[in-house]
Image (tube, coloured by chain):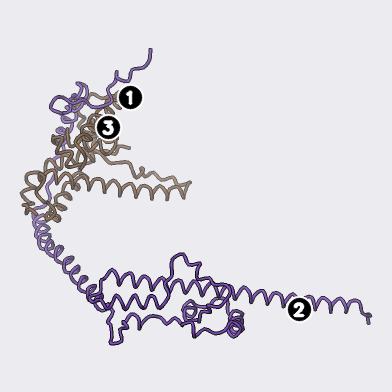
Amino acid sequence: MPFDPQLFPRRPTVDEEHDLRLPDELASLGEQLSDDAEFITNRYPGSAPPREAVTEIANVSGRASHWKVWIPAAAAAVLLIVVSAAWQMRRPVVDATGVSSLDQTRVATPSSSDYKSPDDDLTSTIAAARSTTAAPPARLINTPVDATTPVDLAHQAPFPVRREHEVRNLSVGVLDEQPAELEDQGILLLQRALERYADFIDQELRRREVERSANAELIQSLRDRIAELEAQLEQALQGPVE
Amino acid sequence: MTRIDIQQAADEHFSRVHRAALVLTGNPWDADDLAQETFLVAARQQHKFEGRSSLYTWLYGILLNLDRRERRRIGTHYRKLKLLSLRDPNSTTSTPPADSPVVAAEWKSSLWSYVAQLPDGQQKALVLRFSEYLRYDEIAEVLQCPLGTVKSRIFHGLAALKTMLADDKEIRQLPPFPAEDIHHAI
């Protein structure tokens, strides 16, 4: 005969008024619990807290509750004023030439006319790469970029990169339409940050490429020197022993 | 925010709060501390009472929170002591284990000592229902859970209590209680 799970109710049953209807055994247990609680309580009556302590704490709490409300509100107001003031100071100012303060403070990126030829720059770069293994990124940003180098790594940036003149036109155009919309300014700032980041990645990849080629030259020269020394050693070993 | 007269509240509700603390802890001194601390916390945080619930349900909420915090603190101390004792396997101390409560003999021989072995939710629901005679909706308000959950906890708590009593081979005849004083029940 298969087991019938309905023989033993798993869920509490409720009556028409949605009140819990306990079986007789459980109801008697509940009554027993109530009787036990009454008995223990009568056996060990408690002692109420001292009136003075309660009154004093209530008075102190009543006074402190006002400060608990006002202090966070005042702190929030001060923080809001400071943030708004900082935001006002951060807004760009357009001068008579149409160049904004953001453009003036921007890190200078050399134009294509400032670029040196690869032969002029390669020797000094190899020497710098040999002297140090890791150049600080700040210097790399201001290092002239050679657009004529065969390996152009700018396309490896994982996002579209606007050129400098495009960004300048965008910024002047936005700032001419006073009042400047915050959203456009945010896009402009983000564009500039991304452009700097792309420049940095470009320079870093180029530096590593140069360093790698310099290391290859150094390794080749060392191999040549080793071969030369081996030849001298072999020649010396084949000579007469004094 | 409703301004309450905490002294009047203590006069009216201390006895029932103390009863709940006593059946929860089983120790008269701990129950005194717990009930008094409940009213001191209520006096300190009376600005948080919004008047949407009954005053005594708010007090029960404070009491249960304090009880939970105290159990957690004792549990943490017990685990630390257990770690210390594990470091010294040759220790032959006669000190009782840290989790052995000091309870009243009357409480230990009552059904509430079995209730203390139930899960936390069922224990508190049974205390509020059969010691404090709260309605189901009031229990749901104190425990901050749905009404159906309260009914389920009470039903399953009583069912588990019945099973525990059936498994116990030495079921005692409840009152009369022995007129002993407090002793250590290990």
Q: Amino acid at mark 2?
A: Arg
Q: Amino acid at mark 3?
A: Tyr
Residues at circles 3 and 2 in contact by the CB criterion of under 8 Å? no
Task: Where is residue A48? Give x, y as percent.
Answer: 11, 47
Q: Which chain is purple?
A: A
Q: Is residue B70 above or below residue A113?
A: above
Q: Residues within 10 Å of mark 1 (few under 14, many from 20)?
A: few
**Which mark identifies residue B167?**
1
Q: Which residue is mark 3?
A: B114
Q: Which residue is mark 2?
A: A225
Residues at circles 1 and 2 in contact by the CB criterion of under 8 Å? no
Q: CA distance from mark 3 to mark 1?
A: 12 Å
Task: Where is residue B93? Give x, y as percent.
Answer: 41, 45
User: What secondary structure is found at the residue carrying circle 1?
Assistant: helix
The N terminus of chain B appears in which quarter of the rendering? bottom left
Per the rendering, the colour in which chain B appears is brown
